[in-house]
Amino acid sequence: ELKVEQNPLFLSMQEGKNYTIYCNYSTTSDRLYWYRQDPGKSLESLFVLLSNGAVKQEGRLMASLDTKARLSTLHITAAVHDLSATYFCAVELDNYGQNFVFGPGTRLSVLP
Amino acid sequence: EAGVTQFPSHSVIEKGQTVTLRCDPISGHDNLYWYRRVMGKEIKFLLHFVKESKQDESGMPNNRFLAERTGGTYSTLKVQPAELEDSGVYFCASSQVRSGLGGVEQFFGPGTRLTVL
């Protein structure tokens, strides 16, 4: 059974600082997704990473994928309060059914 | 363009009762997914429709859960009879058909919070 872990689960950081959220998974997959969820809202797609070495950036967020290490990172640069949310990674199983396995989420709080 | 909508937003029922959740996907999206997040746990895949066909229902917990997508448009998820452990937030998502080897961008609804007392 595929397991997806995230580290840390809770992160409190000051504005202007940098930090990285890690997503590890236990079986082979070439497709990894990052989502953001604000309290009481739906999940919003951030990044779709489709191959080893893929790197995508949007604003202060940058995501990367190392399929050999089964590791994805979400790097936050110069955090601002608006980035406070819960971030989920999800791995797509290599089967026809498009079954997605989510990590537990990382709750990020950016403090002024 | 309207996003994925879900109804109701909240439902509180007693153990043994029946509840039906509804999901309206984005128009034109053939793929429709149901997920559940039990308090403090991960978001768990329940099942995946392609149009009206169940492509993968490996995540359905047991036969108290029944999902349908008649006509390939909206979907319903019925829980009958509901048990205490069914409490959680039920999310629906939709996506377009995958293009080649590309990824699948899912658009999520706001979820239905189900509380079974």
Image: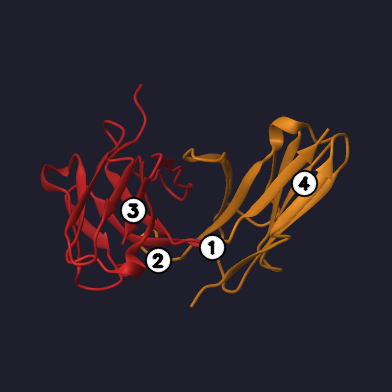
- Residue highlighted by disc 3: B114
Which residue is at 71% across, 56% downward? A10
Q: Is residue A17 visible?
A: yes
Please determine whether, in this image, residue B108 is positioned above or below residue A68. Answer: above
Q: Which residue is mark 4?
A: A75
Q: Are marks 1 and 3 on the same chain?
A: yes
Q: Colour of chain A?
A: orange
- The residue that disc 1 covers is B40
Residue located beneath label 2 in the image: A95
- The one nearer the camera, A9 or A58, is A9
Mark 2 or 3: in front is 3
Q: Amino acid at mark 2?
A: Asn
Cα–Cα span, label 4 and label 1? 24 Å
Label 2 to label 3, Cα distance in Å?
30 Å
Q: Nearer the viewer, mark 4 or mark 1?
A: 1
Residue A60 is drawn in which quadrant? top right
Residue type for callout 4 = His
Badge 1 crowding class, 10 Å Cα cut-off, few under 14, some 14 to 19, many 20 or more, is few
Q: Which mark is residue A43?
A: none
Where residue B49 appears, x then y in whole percent?
A: 25, 53
Q: Nearer the viewer, residue B27 or B11?
A: B11
